[in-house]
Image (tube, rainbow, N blue to C red):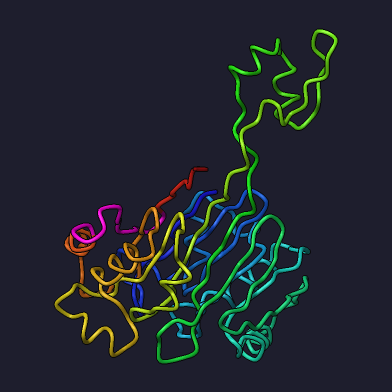
Amino acid sequence: MQITFLGTAGSWPTKERNASSIAVDTERELILLDCGEGTQRQLFSSSQSFMRVRRVFLSHFHGDHFLGLPGLIQSMCLNHREEPLAIYGPPETREIVERILNLGYFTLRFRVDIHPLEPGASVELEGYTVRTSKAEHPVPSLAFRLDEGPKRGRFDAPKAHQLGIRGTDFARLEAGESVEVGGRTVRPEEVMGPPRAGRSIVYSGDSAPSEEIRRLATGATLLIHEATTASDLEAEANVWGHSSARQAAALAREAGVQELFLTHFSSRYKVVEPLEAEARAVFPASRAARDLLDHLIRQP
């Protein structure tokens, strides 16, 4: 599983940072978490293909989180896409996306499936589940948690050697096949460890510090949390439904996540290393995201 930060700016793009969007590559499909202005251009510059996007999860309908969607859909049409696109978001998602699909003159060549979600909703998809919670923001807003299904245990090569496994039989066992060795059948479960939990990603969208998001993020592999300001401005940020880097780190620590990425930085910050330092003082596994950064989330 790999994430690519397509935009890490807060409220409006800057010369260094695009508006909010994150690509999640599950290997089966490419997902977008938000789709701010310029997302398709960022995809062209990234390691990902915009035509692979199968689902878009929109946290809310402030422009910096969804205004890239009209251009993305119309470019997909111009490139003769036929595969359906699924769009998920807060309760007003159907009304707003239907308006987007009627902007300007173009031919919609593929089906767009629209899925309004309430906080607390859960969506079962191929190989993973997406759960939602309410985010603390002035407009209806969602945070998302993506959980992979359980993974097979690790292959026990020393034990396989002891059982006389050689050559291509290793690959057959790893693929789930039984093999014949020395007159007996060796089953995959004999050389595989116990099942492992899948990886999990939590995305806050825009939010002031939130107990709902803390609960959603409990035990997650990776938390991506907005960090609009440094701690000296966090009271003002909270009034407008945003968090400081320090508050994001405190939430990560309390939720027991493995790793934290900060994003959605105010344009007042030309460099974000001081925000990263504030977060690391609270939660050492904190990191400031940057546009077009790829990050591989390894299996535990």
Q: Residue furthest right?
A: 183
Q: Is residue 283 magenta?
A: yes
76 in the magenta segment: no
Tell whether 275 sits left or right of 6: left
Most foreground residue, 253 or 207: 253
Position of residue 263 in the picture relative to residue 98 (left or right): left
In this picture, residue 20 sits left or right of residue 82: left
> Which residue does the image show at 20% across and 62% down from the upper left?
271
Residue name at image x 77 percent, y 73 percent: 111
**Count of numbered circles on the image:** 0
Instruction: Say if 79 sits above or below 89 in the image.
Output: above
Q: Residue at x 76, y 24 (%)?
A: 172
Instruction: Place residue 116 in its image quadrant.
Output: bottom right
Outermost left residue: 232
Q: Nearer the viewer, residue 13 or 185?
A: 185
Residue 272: % across, % down: 22, 62
Where does residue 146 sit, x and y in percent of width and height? Answer: 56, 62
The image quarter containing residue 259 is: bottom left
| Residue 194 in which image quadrant | top right
In the image, residue 5 sits, relative to residue 268, either above or below, namely above
Question: Residue 197: x and y, percent?
Answer: 57, 49
Identified at 68% across, 83% down, the residue is 101
In this view, the residue in front, 31 or 142, is 142
Q: From what the image shows, is residue 150 above or below residue 57?
A: above
124 or 116: nearer the eye? 124
What range of the chain is rendered magenta? 280-292
56 vs 63, left or right, is right
Q: Position of residue 287 (x, y in %)?
A: 30, 55
